[in-house]
Amino acid sequence: MAFSLGKRLKATREALGLTQEQVIEQLELRYGITLSQQAISCIEHGKRKVDAERELPAFAAVYSKPIDYFYETLQLPAASPAAPAPKRHSAVTVDMEALTHRDRLELAAELIHNVLQET
């Protein structure tokens, strides 16, 4: 299955038990980002892009996830309990020019942290 940022955002929202309305409220209150329910729906269905500089960091904060979480490849469960779990790798395809300086630093720190954990 192809990666979809919108699907990952929707799955995360649902896993956290949040409604679109609750996300809209948090984005407005905490970050001054005004989105309609239709806009959230369009994002989650891949019909609207997410602003990488303002919206994606806000979604990540509302969902308490690092930005690169939304770009990680999904892993299928191991075939049997005895089988070792596969290493998780990120498939990060981010337009670095679209990110703020702070977002770039946070992403770099997260990537360094992940590399150090694997060694």
Image (cartoon, rainbow, N blue to C red):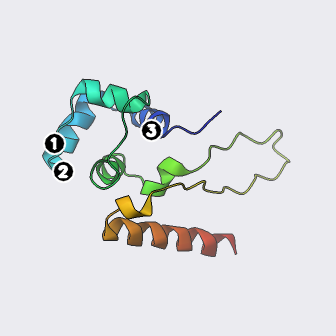
Q: Position of residue 71 (x, y in %)?
A: 52, 50
Question: Camera-side residue: 5 or 109?
Answer: 5
Q: Is residue 37 left or right of residue 6?
A: left
Q: Nearer the viewer, residue 47 or 55?
A: 47
Give the residue at x 33% y 46%. Answer: 59
Q: Residues within 10 Å of mark 2 (few under 14, many from 20)?
A: some
Instruction: Determine if residue 19 is in view.
Output: no
Q: Are marks 2 and 1 in contact (CB under 8 Å)?
A: yes
- Front residue (pair 60, 84): 60
Residue wearing tag 1: 28
Q: From the image, tell me which residue sits under label 3.
A: 12
Q: Rate crowding at label 3 as few (under 14), some (14 to 19) or many (20 or more) other CA atoms within 10 Å.
A: some
Question: What amino acid type should be assigned to the residue bearing mark 1?
Answer: Glu
* Mark 3 and mark 2 residues within 8 Å of each other at the beta carbon: no
> What is the C-alpha distance between the residues marked 1 and 3?
19 Å
Mark 2: which secondary structure? Answer: helix
Q: Is residue 47 above or below residue 71?
A: above
Residue type at numbered disc 2: Tyr
In this orientation, does residue 104 appear?
A: yes
Q: Which residue is mark 2?
A: 31
Tell which circle, 3 or 2, labels the residue nearer the N-terminal end: 3
Q: Residue at x 14, y 45 (%)?
A: 29
Which quadrant holds the C terminus? Answer: bottom right
Report the Cα–Cα distance between label 3 and label 2. 19 Å
Q: Is 28 displayed left or right of 114 in the figure? A: left
Identify the element where label 1 is drawn.
Answer: helix
Residue 58, percent across and down? 29, 50
Q: Mark 3 or mark 1, which is nearer the start of the sequence?
A: 3
Q: Position of residue 11 (x, y in %)?
A: 47, 33
Picture quadrant where residue 36 is located: top left
